[in-house]
Image (cartoon, rainbow, N blue to C red):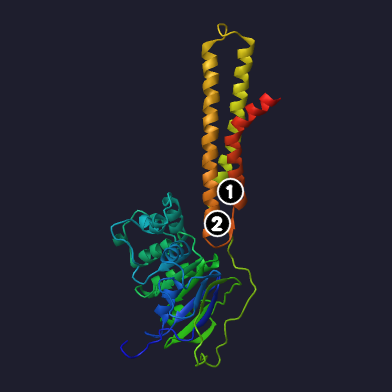
Amino acid sequence: MGDSVVHALDNVDLDIERGEFVAITGASGSGKSTIMHLFGCLDRPSAGTIVFNGRDVSDISDRELASIRNKQIGFVFQTFSLINRTTALDNVGTPLFYARRSNSRGPARAALERVSLANRAHHRSNELSGGERQRVAIARAIVNDPLLVLADEPTGNLDSRTGEQIMAIFRSLNEQGVTIVLVTHEQEVAVQAGRIVQMRDGKIVADGPGEQARGGTVPATNIKETPSAAPVARPRGIAPAPATTATPAFSPRMARGATRALALGIVAPCLAVVSAVAGGLIRQQKQGLSLNEMPPTPFLIMAGFATLTLLLAIVFGIIAIFTGRAALKRVHNEPGAWRGTGRARAGRLLGWLGILLPFLIPALRALI
């Protein structure tokens, strides 16, 4: 700013573990918004590093940052930031639309159920109360099952009773394993978190447990800036957040499409075998009867059935291959704990088997 240099964040070194509920407090200009923008991959640091889920995101491409924001981070804003002309269900499904998910209604409805608002799914946002709009915003933040939810003054525009209801939802989500970082200037809101980080003039001046201490062991977000000469001040009587070895209350996610790939992969070779059996019966009939003696209608039905099952085996095999490939690609590109890779690989293998069997069986029969 002219000849002066403003350190929005200065000598910040902060680890947030997966499964924690952290409140960041401080006066205006203390650096709360800046640190939230860095957590959310909205800004890049001028020095130091940001590590998200074990990956340095300080200097990756804008496209990669956008993918991380869309799929792994949920945002809740003080002003709700809803689209007024659409329903609550469509607002919640917006991140799925940008993620190019073909099915957005089901996950969006499930997210609304998690915040007890499924009965208002088809109401437009201007038909909802302030508390209901904030619950829609929370549902939108969690619809992609993110690793981290960032909330910027989520109770700032709400009355105290509605604010307590919103905080109860955040506590419930945290108990389900969602990592939550909340920025607030209200002390009565901050003490409901498991850990309170207090900022002043771009520095962390206090870091201690809230009334309900929680923790985890797997780093979800880590910000490290280049050390400066001045040490970080820590007021007396406030101890650092205690380390814990408790296992976070979350389970690995099932890779989307893995089960479908396995099911299609199982069906494909079965159809190929049925087609081969039908073709064998046709050959036996042709060998036992002359062309004039062969009944035309049963022969055509059997031939059509054999051809149809052959085509279905090939189509199902192709779909199984591409579905399994997409599931494995999703696991590779999106960090986190995943289940279903074995199903996806098995589905791809069985898909290839369903495609090749119709050609292998006649070849083996000729050799025999």
Give the residue pinned by disc 2. Answer: 331
Identify which residue, 297 or 215, lies in the foreground. Answer: 297
Where 269 falls versus 37 (above or below)? above
User: What's the residue at 52%, 45% (across, down)?
Assistant: 322
Identify which residue, 205 or 336, lies in the foreground. Answer: 336
Under circle 2, the secondary element is helix
**Quadrant of the drawing holding the C terminus:** top right
Residue type highlighted by circle 1:
Ala
Residue type highlighted by circle 2:
Val
The circle on residue 344 is 1
Where 261 falls versus 168 (above or below)? above
**What is the x, y in percent for residue 306?**
55, 24
User: What's the residue at 59%, 35% (across, down)?
Assistant: 356
Mark 2: give few (<14), some (14-19) or many (20+) Cα within 10 Å: some
**Quadrant of the drawing holding the N terminus:** bottom left
**What is the x, y in percent for residue 351?**
58, 40
Classify residue 320 by image quadrant: top right
